[in-house]
Every structure is written in structure tokens, then in C-alpha cells.
Image: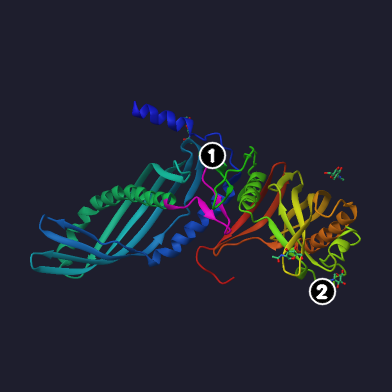
């Protein structure tokens, strides 16, 4: 009964229909590049690896230890890694691997101790591993081994020093047994390694704090999708207000991101992601500003005082002569952002409350305006920089309330338009220079292109990864 209820509960709270707002596609080009970098990294690291000691017992009474085992030579053929649709994962094989290791040996039989060095070489090792990619209940990517096969062609071992001259003659009879034992160890080691990756994936956070007010949730919304040429990861991509966690009153809409086979990866970002950030800022009360006269350059012909407002609100200097003013500006709704083919749009509904500052610092409310503004712009990536331009499409000011009697808003509207245009031309100068794309310590995006589509923006890019630190 209890389990029946649990299932019912699980079904009723299931958010299976949630659309991903961010999609990441890894193409075969990206997979092959990643493999190449990984194989080079392993080859570089081989010299530094000290393998764990091996201890055991021979003939039932001689304890032995092989210690300080290092790789002395490794012939690592380029592995093959492919998307494997049948297991929703990857198939990796290394064929014809040969490795030589050397180290020290120690034996003890009661109080008799002996020791020396040894060399071990294994030839023609073939390993094939298939892993499955999945998703756990918390939206973490998960990885598990579904198939592993290992064959060792041959193994040779030689001992030197100590009393090794006694047993070196019959060691050769054990070569096949050593070969078999190494062969049996490979797949458990591969599985252990995959379990370790899985452990790290489970420990990874899927929710990040991005600004003091906002966090970004990036769990998988459904299983990764694999076909013969791509891996797609559907991610939630929703910002939230860290304090309130209030859900926005709108949902992510589905969109189709096409993987571009000539690029290593593609990322699709829905307008929902940006709107969730704007909504988060709005609910956090961040979208507001207090404009005072001290923010206006002294050289400006216009100042925030009642005499300056004479052309716009003629009665103001008569009612409140010679007083400084301040404007409280805030969003009356969360701004709405949208991606249209080739263009981005932003609609902003704001409120402007004006008050006079009395000599005793009391604020006297004067009037309240609503501002309805629409902006559009273009964004693109050029030479590794995010560039663009913006323009104001429409701006209207309406008088919502007044403590000083009614007045026409047209003149004031034109004044604010001039102010906005000045601000936009500053912004456009910066957008023309461009913003350098974010880069990580050991990776950067190259050859990136950005396309604005209906409802989302698609970025396709190659990446450059240098696994060990380098001076650029
Ligand atoms: C995938 O599975 C199908 C049916 O289960 C099978 O016919 C096909 O050969 C498999 N493909 C590979 C590459 O193993
Ligand atoms: C008000 O602003 C005007 C400029 O528009 C300036 O000449 C005048 O001195 C200012 N008055 C006060 C009281 O700050
Ligand atoms: C400040 O001055 C205004 C106008 O002179 C007056 O109405 C108001 O009561 C004063 N406030 C205080 C706290 O003195
Ligand atoms: C600007 O907005 C107002 C009110 O929202 C509307 O009446 C007017 O048609 C719009 N103008 C343009 C050019 O879109």
C-alpha cells in the first residue's frame, strides 16, 4: 500500500514535461578532438605514474611485494571513441597497446629477506569499453559501464638481483599465468575508473550562484540523447532569485537546436533563460534606481531642480521654487526579452516618481509617470568578441498621478528620449568594440558563430583545450 502511494506521489509531482531552456550538443568533431587531447595527456602523464604496490604469497609461505612500479615504455596507439547509440553512450577501444614497467621486488620467508629489481612487459593489449550515459533523480549526468572486454597478447617478466638467479629459470613457465592475471585485472580496473568518474559526476553541483541575487539551475531535464554523430544534453537553464526562489509565471518553450557537424559543439539558449534572470532581478527588487542631481554632470544645461522643469511642468517652479529634485525609477513588471530571427527585443515597463527635496530634507511627492519602452538590437560574434548594436523602437511617457496638477508629457517624453539615445550611443560604442568571450584557465572557444533564431540563440564553436597549464 505504502509503495503504491509512493508511486502515485512520484507520478503526481513528476515534472517530466519540462522543456530544456539550454541545450548543449557535442558533435563527432568535438568528440574526436577531446579524445585526441585526452590521449596526449595520458601519454604525457605516463612517466609520472607510480603504480600501487602488488603483494602476495607464492608457494604458500613466501611473501612478496612488487614496489615502486613505474611505466618505462608505452606504445599507446590512438584510441577510438565513438558515439554508441545502442547504449546511449560511448564505445572506446584501444587496440595493440604495449607497456613495459619496472620496479623492485622484495620477498620474505620468515626472517629471510631478499630483494632486487624486475621488468615486466605486456604486449598487444586490446581493451574495448562501452559506457552508458544517463541521468539521476537530481538531474546529474551519470555514467556506467555496460560492457568491457580485454585481451592481453603476451606478457614477459624478468627478475634481477638477490636470489633471483634461482627462480629466473622457471619464471618463464609462468608467463601465461601472468598474462592471464593481468588480463583479468583490466576490466575491473576500467569499471573502477568509470565508477570514480560517476562519483565525481554525482558530487558536481547543478545549481550555481551567478550574482549576489541570482542562481542558475542546470540539471538535466531528461536523458541525454545520442545518435551516431552527436550527444545532446537538455538542461533546465533557469535563473532563480536566491532569496525567494519564486517561480516565474511563464515556462520554457520547446526549441530545436541543430548540431553543426563542422563545429565541435553547439549551445542553444532560450529566451526563457534570460527572462528568468530578469524575473529573478525583478523579484529581488534590483531593477530600480534613484536618480539625483549629483549624477548629472555640472556642465549639463539641464539639472534636476524645479526651475529646470519649467518648460515641462510650468506650474512646478511656482509651487516649489528653487528646490532640488530626485527621481525614483523602477520596473513595474519584469522586463520581457525575446529572440526573433536575426534580432533581439526588450520591452520595459517602468514607473518614474518625482519628488522635491525640501530644505529640511523632507521629500515632497510631485508626480508619477509610467514609461513604456521597447528596444531592439543585433548581436553577433566576430573575431572572438561578442558585438552588436541596440536602438530604441518606442518610448511613451504617461502621467499616472500628480500632486501638482495635470500637464502634458510630450515635452518631457522628448527630453527623456534624448537621454536614452545618449545612453544607447555610449552602449553602442562598447558593443561595436565588443566584449571578449569568457574563457577558462585551460580552454577557450575559437571560431565561434552566433545566430539569433525565433525563441533562442544558437552558438556553434570549436574549442581549444590545453590540459596542462601553458603561458599564452
Ligand atoms: C544495435 O542494436 C540493434 C538492435 O538491437 C542491432 O541490430 C545493431 O546491430 C546494434 N548496433 C550495434 C552497432 O551494435
Ligand atoms: C537649477 O538648474 C539650473 C540649470 O538648469 C541652474 O542654472 C540653477 O542654478 C539650478 N538651481 C538650483 C537651485 O540648483
Ligand atoms: C519640512 O518642511 C516642509 C515644508 O516647509 C514642511 O511641510 C514639513 O512639515 C517639514 N518637515 C519636518 C520634519 O520638519
Ligand atoms: C509606441 O507605443 C504607443 C503606446 O504603447 C503606441 O500607441 C504607438 O503606436 C507605438 N509606436 C510605434 C512606432 O510602435
Q: Pointers 1 and 2 in contact (CB under 8 A)?
A: no
* Residue 212 is covered by the magenta coloring: yes
* Residue 271 is covered by the magenta coloring: no
Q: Determine whether the residue tagged by mark 1 lies in a helix, strand or loop.
A: strand
Q: Residue at x 17, y 66 (%)?
A: 165
Percent of width and height locating residue 235: 56, 44
Q: Determine whether the residue tagged by mark 2 lies in a helix, strand or loop.
A: loop
Check the picture and name the quadrant holding the C terminus. bottom right
Residue 325: mark in rendering: none
Location of residue 98 with respect to 147 vertically, above or below: below
Residue 41 appears left or right of 341: left
| Image mark count | 2
Q: Residues within 10 Å of mark 2 (few under 14, many from 20)?
A: few
Q: Give the range drawn in magenta.
A: 203-221
Q: Quadrant of residue 384?
A: bottom right
Percent of width and height locating residue 193: 37, 52
Q: Residue at x 67, y 45 (%)?
A: 271
Q: Which residue has dot 2 on it?
A: 298
Residue 395 visible, this angle:
no
- Mark 1 to mark 2: distance in Å? 60 Å
Of callouts 1 and 2, which one flags the residue occurring earlier in the amino acid sequence?
1
Location of residue 314 with respect to 132 vertically, above or below: below
Residue 111 visible, this angle:
yes
Percent of width and height locating residue 233: 55, 44
Q: Residue at x 36, y 47 (%)?
A: 191
Residue 134 appears left or right of 234: left
Q: Which residue has dot 1 on it?
A: 225
Residue 216 appears left or right of 327: left
331 or 342, nearer to the observer: 331
Percent of width and height locating residue 353: 76, 55
* Outermost residue toward the left in this view: 110
Amino acid at each position: 500500500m505504502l509503495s503504491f502511494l509512493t508511486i502515485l506521489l512520484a507520478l503526481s509531482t513528476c515534472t517530466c514535461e519540462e522543456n530544456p531552456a539550454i541545450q548543449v550538443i557535442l558533435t563527432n568533431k568535438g568528440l574526436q578532438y577531446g579524445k585526441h587531447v585526452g590521449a596526449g595527456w595520458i601519454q604525457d602523464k605516463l612517466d609520472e605514474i607510480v603504480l600501487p604496490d602488488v603483494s602476495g604469497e607464492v608457494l604458500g609461505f613466501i611473501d612478496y611485494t612488487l614496489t615502486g612500479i613505474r611505466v618505462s615504455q608505452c606504445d599507446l596507439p590512438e584510441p577510438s571513441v565513438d558515439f554508441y547509440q545502442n547504449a546511449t553512450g560511448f564505445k572506446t577501444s584501444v587496440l595493440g597497446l604495449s607497456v613495459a614497467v619496472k620496479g623492485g621486488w622484495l620477498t620474505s620467508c620468515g626472517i629471510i629477506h631478499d630483494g632486487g629489481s624486475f621488468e615486466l612487459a605486456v604486449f598487444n593489449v586490446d581493451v574495448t569499453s562501452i559506457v552508458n550515459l544517463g541521468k539521476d533523480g537530481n538531474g546529474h549526468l551519470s555514467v556506467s559501464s555496460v560492457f568491457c572486454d580485454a585481451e592481453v597478447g603476451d606478457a614477459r617478466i624478468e627478475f634481477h638481483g638477490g636470489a633471483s638467479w634461482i627462480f629466473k629459470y622457471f619464471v618463464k613457465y609462468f608467463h601465461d599465468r601472468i598474462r592471464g592475471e593481468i588480463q583479468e585485472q583490466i576490466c575491473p580496473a576500467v569499471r573502477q575508473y568509470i565508477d570514480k568518474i560517476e562519483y565525481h559526476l554525482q558530487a558536481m553541483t547543478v545549481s550555481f550562484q551567478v550574482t549576489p541575487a541570482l542562481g542558475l539551475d542546470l540539471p538535466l531535464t531528461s536523458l541525454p540523447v545520442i545518435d551516431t554523430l552527436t550527444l545532446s544534453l537538455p538542461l533546465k537553464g533557469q535563473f532563480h532569485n536566491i532569496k525567494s526562489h519564486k517561480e516565474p509565471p511563464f515556462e520554457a518553450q520547446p526549441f530545436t537546436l541543430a548540431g553543426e557537424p563542422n563545429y565541435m559543439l553547439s549551445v542553444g539558449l532560450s529566451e526563457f533563460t534570460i527572462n528568468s534572470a530578469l524575473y529573478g532581478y525583478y523579484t529581488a527588487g534590483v531593477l530600480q534606481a534613484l536618480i539625483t542631481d549629483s549624477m548629472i554632470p555640472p556642465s549639463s544645461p539641464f539639472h534636476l531642480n524645479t526651475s529646470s522643469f519649467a518648460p515641462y511642468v510650468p506650474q512646478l517652479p511656482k509651487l516649489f521654487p528653487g528646490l532640488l529634485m530626485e527621481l525614483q525609477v523602477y520596473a513595474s513588471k519584469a522586463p520581457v526579452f525575446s529572440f526573433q530571427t536575426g534580432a533581439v527585443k526588450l520591452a520595459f515597463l517602468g514607473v518614474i516618481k518625482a519628488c522635491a527635496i525640501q530644505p529640511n530634507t523632507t521629500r515632497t511627492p510631485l508626480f508619477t509617470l509610467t514609461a513604456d519602452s521597447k528596444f531592439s538590437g543585433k548581436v553577433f560574434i566576430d573575431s572572438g568578441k561578442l558585438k552588436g548594436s541596440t536602438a530604441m523602437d518606442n518610448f511613451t511617457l504617461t502621467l499616472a498621478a500628480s500632486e501638482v496638477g495635470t500637464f502634458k508629457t510630450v515635452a518631457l517624453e522628448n527630453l527623456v528620449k534624448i537621454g536614452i539615445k545618449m545612453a544607447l550611443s555610449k552602449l553602442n560604442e562598447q558593443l561595436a568594440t565588443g566584449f571578449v568571450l569568457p574563457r577558462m584557465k585551460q580552454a577557450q572557444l575559437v571560431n565561434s558563430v552566433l545566430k539569433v533564431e525565433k525563441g533562442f540563440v544558437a552558438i556553434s564553436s570549436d574549442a581549444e583545450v590545453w590540459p596542462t597549464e601553458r603561458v599564452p
